[in-house]
Amino acid sequence: MSTTTIEQAPAVALPPTSTFFQRFCRNRTAMVSAIILAIIVLAAIFAPYIAPHDPAKSSLRAILKPPGAVYWLGSDDLGRDVASRLIFASRLSLVASVQAVAIALVIGLPLGLIAGYVGGWIDTIISRFNDALMSFPALILAVVIVGLMGPSLSNAMTAIGLVYAPRIMRVVRGSTLSVREEVYIRAARAMGCGDIRIIALHVLPNVMGPLVVQATVLMGQALLAEAGLSFLGLGAQPPLASWGAMLGTAFPYMQQSPVPTIASGVVISVTVLCFNLIGDGIRDSVGRMRRAGD
Amino acid sequence: MTTPCLRVENLNVMYDVGKRKLHAAKDVSFEIAPGETLGLVGESGSGKSTAGLALLRLIEPSSGKIMLGDTNVATAGRRELQLLRKRMQMVFQDPYSSLNPSMTIEQLLTEPLIVHADMAASDRRAAVGKMLESVGLHAGYAARYPHEFSGGQRQRIAIARSMMLHPDLVVLDEPVSALDVSTQSQILKLLKNVQAASGTAFLLVAHDLAVVRLMSPRVAVMYLGEIVETGPSARVYDEPAHPYTAALISAVPFPDPVRQRSANRIILGGDLPSPLNPPSGCRFRTRCPFAMDICARAAPPTVQVEGGGVAACHLHTEGPKLGGRSLNAFMRERNIGAMEVTT
Amino acid sequence: MDPLLSLKDLTVQFPSTHGLLTVVDKVSFDVGRNEVVCVVGESGSGKSVTMQAAVGLVQTKGGRVTGGSVRFDGQELVGMKNRHLNRIRGNDIGFIFQEPMSSLNPAYTVGEQIAEVVRRHRGVSRAEAWKRAVEMLERVHIATAAARAHDYPHQFSGGMRQRVMIAMAIACDPKLLIADEPSTALDVTIQARILQLIKELQTASGMSVLFITHDLGVVAEIADRVVVMYGAQVVEEAGVDALFATPRHPYTTGLLRAMPQVALERGEDPVAIPGTVAQAHAWPAGCRFNPRCEFREDGPCTTGQVQLVRDDHGLVRCIRADALRTRLTQAVAA
């Protein structure tokens, strides 16, 4: 179609810069956190094969036993193996966190995209409502919602998800506002792309970075919130156990047998810490696509 | 005469700045024939980019007609506008920000086809490969991302994208000013080749008259929102009839030190006046080395210039009464060398 | 007499995902007293980094001077403690940057900012410093300087802001003014006045100017001597008249012939240099310009290192320089 010759162009494009994954792997703290988290997730998946005992089976002869060869982390007030219960509880805790964050995403992401992209009075309404929601303490709001819907882990996490939705929405709105001003969005409009297409294909991929960071950090917070609610008896109901519920049941016997309390607490803290550090790692690894040099 | 590809009549663009109105483009009118290039030249604040963006309704014009063929773009509804955009495309100044960093070259180039054309995926892929080669890039680059390319290569990709639908008109907004000098002329040459092959009309928005002179047979010069001179590029470049055009040309330093030392140059005083509060009469008068009393009182008349085109300047009807002659002759007569006005 | 500024084999490296990148490679040149030297090159040529490294400003960006020396007025600047460097920067060496917008602090009036520089380096009283600030604004032709000194940067236009930057740079009567693309972000009609102003100030004060630009037109306007950089190296150095009349390096002629004004003058299309600017992570073997050079000969140009050679004209880094002498001169002759 044209007389332009190919040899006029350079022989090779610039080499690809390092990918997100390469940069993340070079971040040692984030990598270690990711490995620990992976072990926890694997333990949750393969719980029946790993746990040394049946987590629900109580033994009257083994009430509040200290840690030993049979009961690695001791036993609780009903004579159940604490180690096995922790392993099984990880399933409930992780799934609960995922549920909360998923609900927050489902609500917050579209609202954030719409508020940021459309702007105007729609943005004003969504943002004011958001500000109002965010000015309530999260856990109190969740307690109220659980109070209305009845105590169950699923209800508790739905409540947490609702409470976290504004945070997702705020991050997405902020990024969308800046992406909206990019020349490539104008270029897409010049090309005749509709608004939905622009939001889905041009805006969304470019707000993913901050979004993933926020979602990861929220995973940790949801885990903490779940622990808090379950500790108060508003989350996981017996005989099911989550980490928070275990902490709650072990706490009264802290004097006689401190290990179950400490163990549950440590597991919760480590997991939350892992989520936060991974979030930091992702934040530091995204969006560095510039080349070095002059 | 054939119907022009684009006819712009009295285009006005106004922004609200607080309570005041900023008149970014004032009564801009021009025509572009099918397959022709028109240069639109000016400095920052001249309204040239605003006018270019308003043509595609990327900025809403306040009034005026934008006729693309028989359709008025200015009054087109939402749906109609989206269809019109198939016929008019844009290439932006900065190839680093005009390509979505999260899309591959193939995704970038197929997007116009997906939006506007009903095409099988394999046909789209073939079209992308062909287009990449026609802008001097290997078809194999389709899977790469924009950040793997240099500025010049990215601008090739942007040009390829604008040509995917074989539009009637492409607005080129400073297409080479962000590029290295050594690669600029590659892109200029490419644009010429693309146009020769496709018959697409270009509106070339640029600050560099030399670039426009090379690329387009006709040029319009803008200052503070208004067109002050139009005409054949060669005439405007060699024999400017408006003092601003003359100043713009002589301000560009020529890469020859011996000539630079001896050149007669107009060095403009002052800065661009605020477009919120433009000078009365002629908008250029505050910086014009030839300003007369009348320039503050009345807007300059539009005068036919010898050798083609028009200029809006009182010098042609008042004072020296140049009557459409070149300003160069006038400057030689007056023996005006390097002059300066400080305001 | 000793040159005012003397760079000798200055080398700067930056860490990157491709390992250590040499972005300034054994760059040597002098800036004499009362002389205007232009360093010209495209993006990635290392021209800006060279300037920043010379005055110890690359560390903040992760770069490191890994070799060579920079002597300024008899003192070695490489390895000098920041405390000492700070005494020289802004006092003996003034700076102007490309972006007049972000180089001024929006929170202070321009008068305060200029006076602050004067006070820091001269230790004079507030009143005296303010007087000096107004005097400097007058010297860069800001009308009603005494009143405008009380204005904030955003109340000035781009061209005026660049004048303010210049006023600040020369407030302490520096021996050397370093200007990094000071007119690139400005419109041509504004640029013409800024160049004129720099030239005027230089002539009046006798300071030296190190001017970094990518525009050969600007070079022709302002330079006494020119250093052409490509691929982190100096490829040619000559007096300004000699460089434009008889360029010795194919890159220099290539840059000239790529300029639209030159092409118009010659009545031909501008001749592009093919390919893209060489990048620090993949310097070609041999001459760094060879993949883009129309005069390349396989063998001598594509292997080994090409040395910078001095002749009657200046310095040139091209193995075929003698063979190409007439062809290159003809290539740019009108």
Image: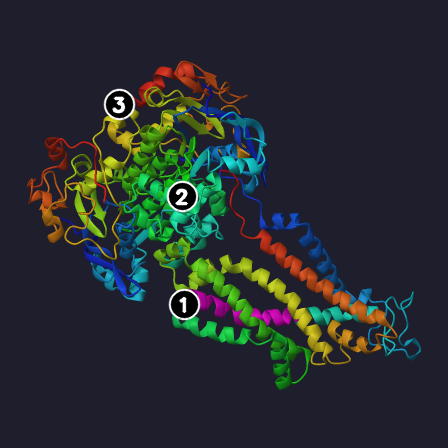
- The percent position of residue B310, horizontal first and vertical second, equals 13, 45
> The residue tagged with tag 1: helix, strand or loop?
loop
- The percent position of residue B38, horizontal first and vertical second, equals 23, 45
Q: CA distance from mark 1 to mark 3?
A: 57 Å
Give the residue type that dot 3 points to: Ala
Q: Which mark is residue C128?
A: 2
Q: Quadrant of the C terminus of chain C?
A: top left
Q: Quadrant of the N terminus of chain C?
A: top left
Q: Residue at image x 26%, y 37%?
A: B251
Q: Observer-nearest residue: B339 or B29?
A: B339
Q: Main secondary structure of the magenta part?
A: helix
Q: Which mark is residue C334?
A: 3
The answer to whether B128 is drawn above or below residue A129 in the figure is: above
The answer to whether C12 is drawn above or below residue A30 in the figure is: above
For marks 2 and 3, the one nearer the N-term is: 2
Label 2: few (<14), some or many (≥20) within 10 Å?
few
The answer to whether A157 is drawn above or below residue A213 in the figure is: below
Q: Chain of mark 3?
A: C
Q: Are marks 2 and 3 in contact (CB under 8 Å)?
A: no
Q: Quick check: is A111 in the magenta stretch?
A: yes
Q: Nearer the viewer, mark 2 or mark 3?
A: 2
- The percent position of residue A269, horizontal first and vertical second, equals 73, 65
Q: Which mark is residue B136?
A: none
> The residue tagged with tag 3: helix, strand or loop?
loop
Q: CA distance from mark 2 to mark 3?
A: 54 Å
Give the residue type that dot 1 points to: Gly
Q: Is residue A249 left or right of residue A109?
A: right
Going by the picture, which residue comes out furthest to the right? A61
- The percent position of residue B223, horizontal first and vertical second, equals 22, 48
Magenta-colored span = A97-119
Q: Quick check: is C271 in the magenta stretch?
A: no
